Amino acid sequence: MKAMSPIVRTMTGLLFAPIFLFGAYIILHGHLTPGGGFQGGAIIATGMALFLVAFGSERWRKKLLSILESTGLMAFVSIGFLGIVGGLFLYNFLAGTGSPIFGQEIAGMAGYAHPNSAPLLSSGTVALLNMFVGLEVVSGLTLIVVTLGLFAFSGKEDD
Amino acid sequence: MINNGVKLLFLLLLVSGLSFMAWGIRDFGEPDGEVSMYDETSGETYKVKRTAMDDHFIESSQSKETSTNNAVTAIVFDYRGFDTLGEATVLFAAVTGVLVSIRHALKSRSKPKGGVKR
Amino acid sequence: MDWSLLYDAIHVVILLGIVAASVLVVRMKDLVSAAVALAAASLLLSLEFFILQAPDVAIAEAAVGAGLTTAIYIFAIKGTRRREEY
């Protein structure tokens, strides 16, 4: 797979970091603003597809991507099993407990005084599940796009 | 191979379990009472049937039960977390299918040129 | 001032754009152009989702429909023929 022109490569180098940052923002603020793990992961995977098309790189670490994807799904299931501590599968056992890991409560919610402000470290397991679903979606969609792209462009070099 | 009797037994078990679950399902929506809503444009009030589950989600997703500010994410990742697990499994299965069907062909196609290091 | 007429007009414009882009997807003989028209239809659909106050679905539709699906279609077209013959 050939690399594209220097204009495209320069613009990709400029745009890749903002796309990655925006996707990470969508994932990490999934419990506060619209979005979540799947949406942010799809955004980062779009940036990866842009990188693949512009630079034509064939040296992707597919084994690492597979391991990351499996890690995301297994961490999701593990957090689900940890919820059995509270009585149910996928029970939100961290929310509102005051623990430093996403355990803060939302202040002023009794009379809906501040319906649109909340601390970043709230929401218990929801933020953790967002992160792991984001990890899985990033690596999974990147793996699909990279594999199909290298397969489509590997046979013929001339056109 | 598994013989047909075991297959038939498994199928009957599956059908009986699924029909038992379908028999015990609750009515769709399950109206629990009426709430009067106010329409801003026409200025008249009308009655809306709301369910107990809707009220529970709206009232307690932002409070101590999940303490998630985004109620949609609270439903997707907490109340309906099992659905999200299924969605993640579907994506995993898709990636596995792509890799299994493409990887062998990719390896055999890019080998004769010899310029690809992986 | 009553803004509902403006909202209706925006809805009608976006929905007509979706219909026009979808007709182009079916009618075009150049498959890369058809894939780009499909991306345009998907982007307009995500705009419609955003106007209907579903930003979650809008983000997912814009990223998957307009980005990744187009890339996969173009890879598939690159692996086969570009022109559709009839």
Image: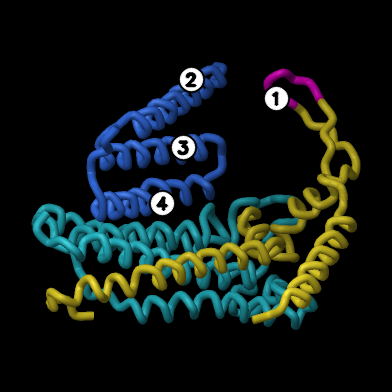
Task: Report x, y in % for residue A53.
Answer: 22, 58
The amino acid at mark 3 is Leu
Task: Report x, y in % for residue A100.
Answer: 60, 79
What's the colour of chain B in the image? yellow
Please determine whether, in this image, residue B21 is positioned above or below residue A84: above
Q: Identify which residue is drawn at 62% across, 81% down.
A: A78
Q: Is residue A26 magenta?
A: no
* Subunit bearing disc 3: C
Magenta residues (range): B39-45
Q: Residue tagged by mark 3?
A: C45
Q: Looking at this view, is C21 or A68 the one in front? A: C21
Few, some or many residues within 10 Å of mark 4 (<14, 14–19, 20+)? many
Magenta segment, prevailing SS (helix, strand or loop): loop
* Subunit bearing disc 1: B
Please determine whether, in this image, residue B72 is positioned above or below residue A88: above
Q: Residue tagged by mark 1?
A: B40
Looking at the colours in the rendered structure, which chain would you say is drawn in cyan?
A
Do the residues at pointers 4 and 2 share their chain?
Answer: yes
Q: Identify which residue is drawn at 58% across, 75% down.
A: A76
What's the colour of chain C in the image? blue
Quarter assignment of residue C18: top left
Disc number for residue C63: 4
Residue B85 relative to residue A42: left or right: right
Q: CA distance from mark 2 to mark 3?
A: 16 Å
Q: Residue tagged by mark 2?
A: C9
